[in-house]
Image (spheres, rainbow, N blue to C red):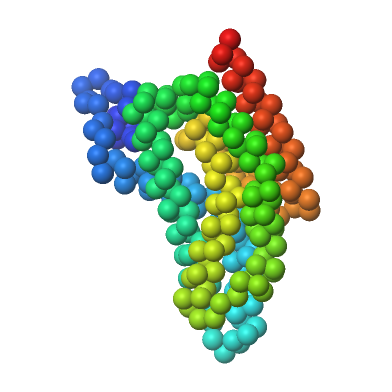
Amino acid sequence: MAAPMATMPGMPEMVMPGVAPPAWDAGHLAMLVAMWAVMMVGMMLPSAAPVILLQAAIDRRRHPAVAPYTATTLFALGYLATWTGFSLLAALAQWAFAGLGLLSEAMTTTSAALGGLLLVAAGGYQLSPLKNACLSHCRSPVHFLVHRRRAGPFGALRMGLEHGAYCIGCCWLLMALLFVLGVMNLLWVAALAAFVLLEKVVPRGDLLGRAAGVFMLVGGVLLLAGSAA
């Protein structure tokens, strides 16, 4: 197991005795993208389940003689495709941070200033009109499916892409906090996924998101103040 661990993307400092340091190349980038994609699927599918199931139910009612699985599958694939694109950007960011020496072996930032900036940015975004607009689409699957409805398999794929875009608009800076909390810290990954789910599905989840935004802002400011001291 030592060799694979020594060559894990994002861990340039983790070098086992007798094992050469990892070479950053397209292969490592592909592994990193795959890692992020798997994480994003695991974190985001629970919060997308209501709209996917509703899509299947609507198609079943409109076309009772035809199984709705094709359209529903294409909708889900469109949704996941957007997060795969996000995974590529996240992998490139992680690659850049690692190349600058800003990531530890645990894949957390070694810079208090960078951590503080990410927290401030995420907290401020939680309170922004753009966040609220994207969140409102994610919290209203019926409204989305009625007003963004498109017929046919390709229409379902496009709807999935659009819903995924709103979801990324809602959560992208929350995902960036993994660089502060630990990209491979499963407890924080699970906690962040639970927060995203609650923000989208519970009554007045938007207020929960704003409260968390204030907490992030305060934590980020304190972290920045400590790094400047």
Location of residue 162 with respect to 225 vertically, above or below? below
Query: Residue 94 location, x and y as percent?
Result: 40, 36
* Residue 130: % across, % down: 64, 50
- x, y percent for residue 4: 29, 35
Question: Which residue is depicted at the point 50% across and 81% down?
Answer: 152
Which residue is farthest front? 129
Nearer to me, 208 or 137 = 137
Q: Residue at x 56, y 41 (%)?
A: 173
Q: Quadrant of residue 116?
A: top right
Total tally of numbered discs in the picture: 0
Location of the C terminus (image quadrant): top right
> Can you name the residue that lies furthest to the bottom here?
65
* Residue shown at 55% from the left, 52% from the top: 168
* Residue 207 locus on image (x, y percent): 77, 45
> Looking at the picture, does residue 110 appear above or below residue 192?
above
Instruction: Classify 151 as above or below 118.
Output: below
Q: Specify whether 9 is left or right of 155.
A: left
The residue under the point 24% across, 39% down is 25
Whether residue 184 appears in this view of the structure is yes
Q: Quadrant of the N terminus?
A: top left
Image-based side of 103 in relation to 99, left or right: right
- Whether residue 185 is visible: no
Viewer-nearest residue: 101 or 30:
101
